[in-house]
Image (cartoon, grey):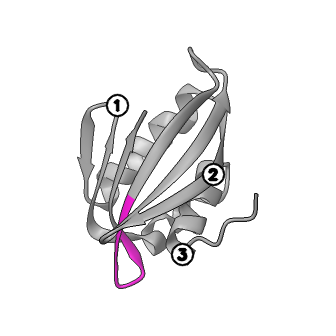
Amino acid sequence: MNLHLPEAVETYFDISNGGDASRLATCFCPDATVTDENRTHQGLAAIEAWHREAQQAFSYRVEPQGTTQQDDALTVTARVVGDFPGSPVQLKHVFVLQNGQIRSLEIAP
């Protein structure tokens, strides 16, 4: 499926799939938040640490499947496949963008 995603979201998924993690600063606002596995990470340093921990813990691939837009939230449903318990899983990535960057991201089943 060929989805048309905003550039920041496209960059985020590229980084999630092994792309250059130094580009996180280009797609997230400096004070952005990421909520994943009931933990919230705020600010670029915390988001970079969260991403690094996830990459070190498991090998995985995130495959966006579809999108919905509601008000200012873009929800991307993605299939995540890897060497983690329960793989594969379907996760919703809810993005709120501001000035072309990710203001917040919430990842949940």
State the separation of the CA atoms marked 1 and 2: 19 Å
- Residue 82 in the image: state x and y as whole percent: 67, 27
User: Who's the residue at 58% across and 45% down the image?
Assistant: 78
Q: Nearer the viewer, residue 107 or 20?
A: 107
Q: Is label 3 in a helix, a strand or a loop?
A: loop
- Residue 39 in the image: state x and y as whole percent: 26, 35
Q: Is label 1 in a helix, a strand or a loop?
A: loop
Q: Mark 1: which amino acid?
A: Glu
Q: Horizontally, is 77 left or right of 19 in the view? A: left
Sequence-earlier tag: 1 or 2: 1
**Residue span colored magenta:** 95-102
User: Who's the residue at 62% across and 21% down the image?
Assistant: 87
User: Who's the residue at 46% across and 35% down the image?
Assistant: 53
Q: Overall secondary structure of the magenta stretch?
A: strand
Q: Mark 2: which amino acid?
A: Pro
Residue 40, above or below 47: above
Residue topped by disc 3: 6
Sequence-earlier tag: 3 or 2: 3
- Residue 47 in the image: state x and y as whole percent: 36, 52
99 in magenta: yes
Q: Please identify the quarter of the rendering in which residue 101 is found.
A: bottom left
Residue topped by disc 2: 64
Sequence-earlier tag: 1 or 3: 3
- Residue 95 in the image: state x and y as whole percent: 39, 61
Q: Mark 3: which amino acid?
A: Pro
State the separation of the CA atoms marked 3 and 2: 13 Å
Is disc 3 surrounded by few (<14), some (14 to 19) or many (20+) residues within 10 Å? some
Residue 43, above or below 4: above
Q: Nearer the viewer, residue 77 or 96?
A: 77
Where, quadrant-wise, is the N terminus in this rendering? bottom right
User: Who's the residue at 60% across and 67% down the image?
Assistant: 10
Residue topped by disc 1: 37
